[in-house]
Image: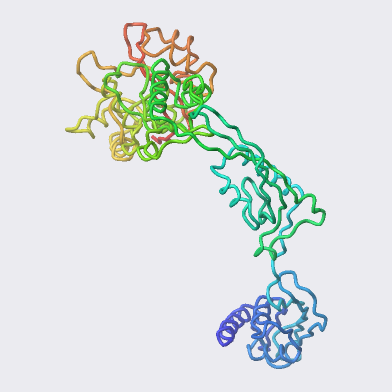
Amino acid sequence: MKKLLLALSSLVVTSSASTIVVSCSTKTEKQNIDSIERFLTAILHSKQNDQEPWTNDALETELVNQKVDVAGGISVKVSEKIEEGTITNKQQSIVFIGNGTSKNNYKYTGSITLIYNFGGNKPAPKKKITKAELAVTIIGLQNFLDTVHFKSESVVKSTFVPNANIPGTPAEGVVFKDATVVILSSTQPTDPSIPKFTKFKVSGTVGIKTNDSEYYEFDDDVTDEDKKFTCEGTIVDSVIIEDNVITQSTEKINNWIKNQQFSDYNDFKNKLLINQKEILENEQIAIDSVNNLDIIENNSNIDSKFWTNQVSVNLKASAGYEFSEEVIQKEQNKIKTDIEILKIQSDPLKWHVLTSKDKKIIEPQFIQFNSTTNINKIQKEYLINQQITQEWNQDDNKTHQKQFVESLNIYTGDDKDQKINKFVNGQHFTNTTAFNFGSNASESLFKVDEILFFDKTQENLNDSINGVLGETKTLNDFVASSNALTREKIENTQNISYYVVFLTKDKEDTYKAANRTLNVMLQEIPIVD
């Protein structure tokens, strides 16, 4: 209380000081009492016994103790009618009246009505469990039983017991109130490689968990009939899958991959999952999941159109079968293999497009190869191995980069050299390469003379890219056959991703295309001359 007194005292003094009007008569202008609403509210709710309402005398005394005004300066009228609060159990209406006039020294005029909340916080209202939620709960239980098979009758009976959680998609707060399991029928296979299936029926009533009745309740229109359920499930005496089945499945997947070429990882994943029955040719086993691991460089495949994508395929046992402990421990059901893909979908190379007035400068020397991203590193290795790019002059890379910037004719004026130096010493050449600029090496170097940009949403994208890789044509023929964009025709260059193919001048009118496409993200960088 003393801390509150000090805080309020200082705050009231500050507030009062801001309204003092000095005049020849030294009288002060009165404040309306609603200007200290938050102070009065704080005093109301600082009452030590928060289970009882205020009285007039007690509250007026407290206002004086807190130095809001002197005795008689503020009158209060507390309501004797105590109402149910919105956030607390009780609330009391209180009117504060400032008694200040031109004939006295009281500070405040006017009146304000405030609410005193007391009696402790009201408990949160119970969550209503609706008829629709019960229906979803029972449907979810049956869906669960359709997909999950139990290993024994004892496991079934320990699952369906009073106050146990309901499997599937239960409504919040519900459990089994009671449940009864009845065994129905069993298959008796003569072949030991075929599992035994036993059907069971479970029926009972949905209820609210014993300790949660103060938080949940059924909606008013929920009947006892709505809470009842009857579902059927299966117990399976599983058959252990032989090791040779896993070996054969691995071989079949790898043989299928060898005869395929995929546009990208998603193309591979979709085809494998759709065609898995025809590929595996075994009812005991299925594909559980497929994961994209990484792009790797295969030097024996350097001249191919395709990137090498490392993937994993995880096998699972079909219903009624299971892997041996040895298979699980050695992870023999997890297959790691390589596929060939035309396009890399993830981690595009960041490519800065310089913009100056109405001009766009799109040069590969501003492609940034992030050294922390393996896919970026692999694409850089490919370009270096194919002699499409090389590092900046290691002896004097700044001079090399200055020569390149000067060749772009971005900067003019007497301070051109100063502008170029500032540009080169900035971040524009971080993780970039020279792309053979200024090189006098042999004619085997692939100098990027033109670039084809492929919109990732265009029709027949894969065929269009595949149709240009490694080909030699005129620029017009490349564009006509693939609907690709050139540097002169591309419009959207701000935070947009493309597949690109580099072209090098072959003869006077023809260009030769690189044998692979890159995944890039264009980002504009404004340049001021």
Using the image as rendered, state which of residue 240 and residue 124 is in the foreground: 240
Q: Is residue 225 above or below residue 488?
A: below
Q: Is residue 305 above or below residue 321?
A: above
Q: Residue at x 20, y 18 (%)?
A: 440
Q: Is residue 85 above or below residue 510?
A: below
In the displayed structure image, the side of residue 37 where residue 342 appears, left or right: left
Q: Residue at x 53, y 20 (%)?
A: 458
Using the image as rendered, state which of residue 59 and residue 439 is in the foreground: 59
Q: Position of residue 312 (x, y in %)?
A: 40, 31
In the displayed structure image, the side of residue 486 where residue 23 appears, left or right: right
Quarter of the image containing the N terminus?
bottom right
Give the tally of numbered discs: 0
Using the image as rendered, state which of residue 439 and residue 305 is in the foreground: 305
Q: Position of residue 216 (x, y in %)?
A: 70, 60
Q: Residue at x 60, y 32 (%)?
A: 187
Q: Quadrant of residue 348?
A: top left
Q: Residue furthest bottom?
A: 71
Q: Position of residue 25 (x, y in %)?
A: 68, 89
Whether residue 356 is visible to the viewer of this picture, yes or no, is: no
Whether residue 198 is visible to the viewer of this picture, yes or no, is: yes
Query: Please, which colouring scheme is shown?
Result: rainbow
Quarter of the image containing the C terminus?
top left
Q: Position of residue 471 (x, y in %)?
A: 37, 9
Q: Residue furthest left?
A: 395
Q: Quadrant of residue 211?
A: bottom right
In the displayed structure image, the side of residue 20 where residue 220 appears, left or right: right
